[in-house]
Image: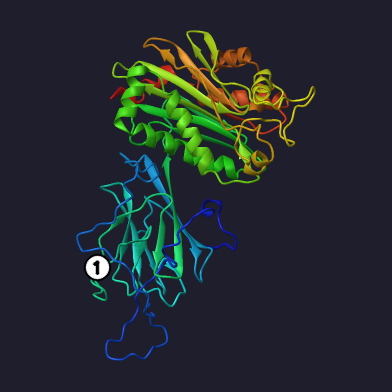
Amino acid sequence: IQTNRSDSSPRIHGIADTSIQGEIHVIDVRNETSEEIHLGSTLRSTRQTSRPSPDQKHKRGDSGEDTRNGSIPLKDNAHRSCLDLEVIAGPCQGISCSRQSTSPTLPITLGRVPPSELVLRDSEVSGKHAQINWNSKTMKWELVDMGSLNGTFLNSQAVHHPDDGSRHWGEPAELADGDIIALETSSKLSVHIALENRRVPAGVGITSDPMVDISFCQYPLQGVEQFGLFGIFDGHGGDGAARAASKILPEKVANILSQHETKEKVLSCSDASDVLRYAFSLTEAAIDHQYEGCTATALLIWFDQNKACFAQCANLGDSACVLSVNGKMTDMTEDHRVASANERARIARSGQPLKDGEVRLCGLNLARVLGDRFLKEQDSRFSSEPYVSPAIHIAKGSTAFAIIASDELWDVITTKKAEQLVVESQPVSSPFCSRVLSEARNLRTKDNTSVIFVDFDILRTDPCIAT
């Protein structure tokens, strides 16, 4: 798929790469006997480049862990990786290409002339310069130089063959979300990789009346099969921040939990509050939306070795989650509207208390959100620090379910009414979601509504847990 986009995507803002001035290069025809330049041939760059020795492989920086998307192993075809490439510098800036790991149209060839899948009209790019393919064994996207004249760089590191002009292919280099591919000096591409779990586990129902609400369900999380994450992001000012957060937060949680010590600490202490707080802070840092924001409500569940289940929730904003265990309902979230007592108390502790009757900050009725960078620059009372609930133990044999929904549902339906609808909707999951959404519409909810229902009794029978 190729599209022309005149404006750059939000994910490329703030990218700093001063060591490489260009990005894509492909070799077409090289005349060894004459210095004359022929029409259509690749122009050889005269820039001297520092290239590694033959035994030096492309490596990530070793100053810390790689917490980006793309580094999480996938186990089966229920998980699909989506690759987005966008030319962010050079004559073809704005051109983009997308592929899924299951696509029959792989690999992707980057080159100056057709039949390259991504054609870059750049004189320093070879006819067939580089190639990107999905490695089904390692479950990673890989970049390989196809013997280009001017070289291929990944995050400023050369990935082409060390013998200049040999026309030999380079060694494959793994790609990760946020990488920058440079084909010599003028063309650069940004890499975005999203992991998509297409499978909804047994006992889970999701429905929505979407406008700016984004729901997600990832069970199991990639690389940490004992854990699952469910959530809703309710956007305002557009759906950009909500869509970005729905991809970033699950990736951050999975990456953090993929560290053995961190995962074992959560399992032994039966508490993931530090994981959730850290994941929220990383998500906030990664969302570069000045005039869009969103709420975030994420329910993390996990099973220990004895198949005992635990549930813990983190939230910003006014979407809510309730958990019922053996008939006892527990609020797993906190209301962060400016009018709520807890938020007014938090703001008062900051030394800038609200005036009586003041229920908005800069026109927004929420005090805690993701994104909205412009508003946060205007008023320091905004926060992105989530509320994290205590972890709830759901013993084997217990009857339990959770409901996550945007504020539009809770504005018209009480938790008691929602519990009644669960009892009346047998079997539950999707029938419950459809029924509660219909009920909300009948009660004339003011806005779009999203609902996620998790039946823990049925979830325990899912093959991912039962095996």
198 with respect to 410 (left or right): left
- Whole-percent x and y of residue 284? 53, 38
| Residue nearest the observer in this picture, 269 or 453 | 269
Report which quarter residue 379 is drawn in. Answer: top right
- The image shows residue 411, relative to residue 67, as above or below, that is above
Residue sitting at 50 percent across and 65 percent down? 89
- The image shows residue 148, relative to residue 213, as above or below, that is below
Q: How are the residues colored?
A: rainbow
- Whole-percent x and y of residue 210? 62, 38
Residue sitting at 70 percent across and 26 percent down? 338
Residue sitting at 24 percent across and 68 percent down? 162
362 with respect to 26 (left or right): right
- The image shows residue 118, relative to residue 355, as above or below, that is below
- Whole-percent x and y of residue 424? 56, 14
Q: Mark 1 points at which residue?
A: 162
**Quarter of the figure that contains the C terminus:** top left
Q: Pointer 1: residues within 10 angstroms few (<14), some, or many (20+)?
A: some
- Whole-percent x and y of residue 287? 54, 43
| Residue nearest the observer in this picture, 33 or 361 | 361
117 with respect to 351 (left or right): left
Residue sitting at 32 percent across and 50 percent down? 60
Q: How many labels does the image show?
A: 1
Specify the farthest residue to the right: 357
Question: SS at mark 1?
Answer: loop
> What kind of residue is marked 1?
Pro
- Does residue 205 appear in the picture of this structure? yes
Report which quarter residue 442 is drawn in. Answer: top right
Specify the farthest residue to the top: 327
